[in-house]
Amino acid sequence: MEWAFRIATDAGFGAGHLIRCGALAATLEQAHTVFTDPGEERIFDNLTGWAKRRVREDRAGTAERAIHWLGERSGRGLIVDSYALDGDMIAKAARCGQTVMFRDGPPYGPEHISVDPNPGAGSHRGVLAGPGFFPLPARLCALRETALQSGTPADRPVAILIAFGQRDSKQCTAKALAGLCEGKREFDVTVVLGPGYPDRAGIFSIAEGNTQVRIVESPEDLASLYADFQLAIGAPGVSQFERACCGLPTILVAQNERQQPLAAAWEETGAAVVAPAVRAEITSEVDHLMADRNRLNTMRDKSLATVDGKGAGRLAAALMQSVRDGVS
């Protein structure tokens, strides 16, 4: 069966969409067409390698061309990864053929299959739920194996990673860094700045003269850095699945209302703790974890247990089985 993907960056969230769709596409191993919003050429340059063909939609937030492709003949399916497409558009796609959509919680439908990989979600007919269905690149499996083999980190000075994705709309990076730079703390801090960070100069100003702070801008492979750290501070998006797969405990800071229940669900797994987007609160959570290294090690184990890195194969198999079963 041939699959197409309708992907949109939705105000800067494109990296996460690309990661999980690329991982799923590599596992499905059929020819793939990718439909994108107009004006996203630069963002989607790295589609080369798994997208056989890319088609621009006429307008952002629509899927007319993808729906036309889906309705041309049978034996095709459309996978939607976008927060911008409304229910009417998804219903129209579902009437034309097998339609799958990534969601961050209910309500589900009108797509044939909803994929909600967040912790706390429950699978039932038409819904594939939980971290076991989150598609991650194969390289994450190798990083997870390395983490498993390395065992519990020794009692040594902790290195902390601050990474809030491409844009960091609430500038939580600055809040976390400013708090950690106050007073004397026995750990190093690495700050990752995405290409859309709104105040790059402000971060360098906060870090100026502090030899314990390193700033990394737009790394090609953030996941490869995870083994160097014992704690991360970030948002509950796609990167949290990567961190958990690599056994990296995280202080999660939600950047909008949609992320708040996601952060709470991760905290329930024991792989993360939640802090509000307030400098003092973030710093307090760091200090609490530094004073309880056993808890930090437990969070590491919970992370590895929650995300096994095999979600792409599991999801691909479930989608193909649904096609064979004629789910509608």
Image (cartoon, rainbow, N blue to C red):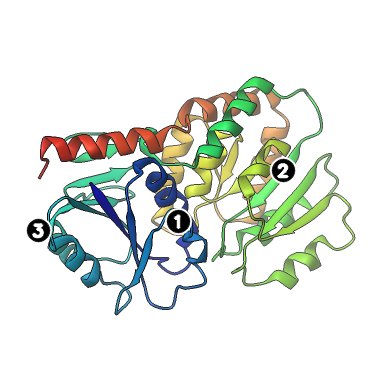
Quarter of the image for residue 63 reads bottom left
Instruction: Report the residue at 12% width, 35% height from top.
Output: 325
Give residue 277's position: percent from left, percent from top: 57, 56
Residue 18 marker: 1
- Inter-mark Cα distance, 3 to 1: 26 Å
- Inter-mark Cα distance, 2 to 1: 26 Å
Instruction: Report the residue at 64% width, 25% height from top.
Output: 297
Q: Looking at the image, is 205 positioned above or below residue 51?
A: below
Callout 3, which amino acid? Arg
Q: Which tag, 3 or 1, sits closer to the chain's start?
A: 1
Q: Secondary structure at mark 3?
A: helix
Label 2 or label 3, whichever lies nearer to me, is: 3
Q: Label 1 near label 2: C-beta < 8 Å?
A: no
Callout 2, which amino acid? Ile
Q: Which one is in front, 46 or 277? A: 46
Give the class, few, some or many, for how many residues have Cα within 10 Å of label 2's Cα (few <14, many ≥20).
many
Q: Looking at the image, is 323 positioned above or below residue 214?
A: above
Query: In the rendered view, does 248 fall on the left or right side of 209?
Result: left
Query: In the rendered view, does 195 fall on the left or right side of 235?
Result: right
Residue at the disc numbered 3: 95
Give residue 215's position: percent from left, percent from top: 76, 57
Residue 160 marker: 2
Q: Which tag, 2 or 3, sits closer to the chain's start?
A: 3
Q: Secondary structure at mark 1?
A: helix
